[in-house]
């Protein structure tokens, strides 16, 4: 039997719009973010979603709410923070431009896009990948047990390891990914 995983990023937030490090700060959807979520919902309209996962952050929950308005068949909504956004530590809430002005473009790029460099007090993408891999392992077990399609309302940095795993990407390719706010990725799981 084959079931589907529908993976999408939350819509644009106020921190995204103003180019700030968000991490696990609870930044809400902008008007554009609501439109993004509605676009994902429209694109998923004809699909079956039996189970749905989100993080505790409002942007993940709110995006999922828009999607699930089209899916009364969804049996259960599950919170799992293993796929939460990367913790940017002391950079959280700071504007990208300010970090670049203070530390230089090279250091900004290292903190922002390096695989294994942690920003001060934060997580590396490598750390995020460990969390997401643990989630994926348990997700496949869950899908085998409950036999259904799954929607996942994730975050930009947590989507990178998801896509690396399911698309069989190299680490370098994963780190180059840009994840849209208004589209989804579908992955079949053979059970």
Image: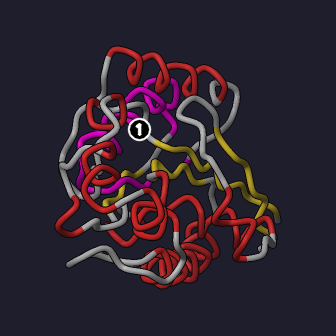
Q: Which residue occupies the foreground of this view, 144 or 184?
A: 184
Report the side of 110 relative to 18 (left or right): right
The residue under the point 56% across, 44% down is 8
Q: How many marks?
A: 1
Quarter occupied by residue 182: top right
Considering only vertical position in the picture, is 171 above or below 147?
below
Quarter occupied by residue 141: bottom right
Residue where numbered disc 1 is placed: 64
Considering only vertical position in the picture, is 190 above or below 179?
below
Give the colouring mode of the picture.
Answer: secondary structure
Considering only vertical position in the picture, is 6 above or below 108?
above
Report the side of 27 relative to 128 (left or right): left
Q: Which residue occupies the foreground of this view, 118 or 127?
A: 118
Secondary-structure class at tag 1 = helix
**Where is the N terminus found, in terms of image quarters?**
bottom right
Task: Residue 151 in the image: state x and y as whole percent.
Answer: 54, 49
**Where is the C terminus found, in terms of image quarters?**
bottom right
The residue under the point 32% across, 42% down is 97
The residue under the point 60% across, 20% down is 42
Task: Residue 133 in the image: state x and y as whole percent.
Answer: 55, 81
Task: Residue 188 in the image: state x and y as whole percent.
Answer: 79, 59
Assess disc 1: are there few (<14), some (14-19) or many (≥20) residues with their C-alpha within 10 Å of its C-alpha: many
The residue under the point 66% across, 54% down is 177
Report the side of 177 relative to 129 (left or right): right
Task: Residue 22 in the image: state x and y as whole percent.
Answer: 27, 50
Report the side of 93 relative to 165 (left or right): left
Tell me if residue 64 is in the magenta stretch: yes
Q: Which contiguous range is marked in magenta? A: 50-73
């Amino acid at each position: 039997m084959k079931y589907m995983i529908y993976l999408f990023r939350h819509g644009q937030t106020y921190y995204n719009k103003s180019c700030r490090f968000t991490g696990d700060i609870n930044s809400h959807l902008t008007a554009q973010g609501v439109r993004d979520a509605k676009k994902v919902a429209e694109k998923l309209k004809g699909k079956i979603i039996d189970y749905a996962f989100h993080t505790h952050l409002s942007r993940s929950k709110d995006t999922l709410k828009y999607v699930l308005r089209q899916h009364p068949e969804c049996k259960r909504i599950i919170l799992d923070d293993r796929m939460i956004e990367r913790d940017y530590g002391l950079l959280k809430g700071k504007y990208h431009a300010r970090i670049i002005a203070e530390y230089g473009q090279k250091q900004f790029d290292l903190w922002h896009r390096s695989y294994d460099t942690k920003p001060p007090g934060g997580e590396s993408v490598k750390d995020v990948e460990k969390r997401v891999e643990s989630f994926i392992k348990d997700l496949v077990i869950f899908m085998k047990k409950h036999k259904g399609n799954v929607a996942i309302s994730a975050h930009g940095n947590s989507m990178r390891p998801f896509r690396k795993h399911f698309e069989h990407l190299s680490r370098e390719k994963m780190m180059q990914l840009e994840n849209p706010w208004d589209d989804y990725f579908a992955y079949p799981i053979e059970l």
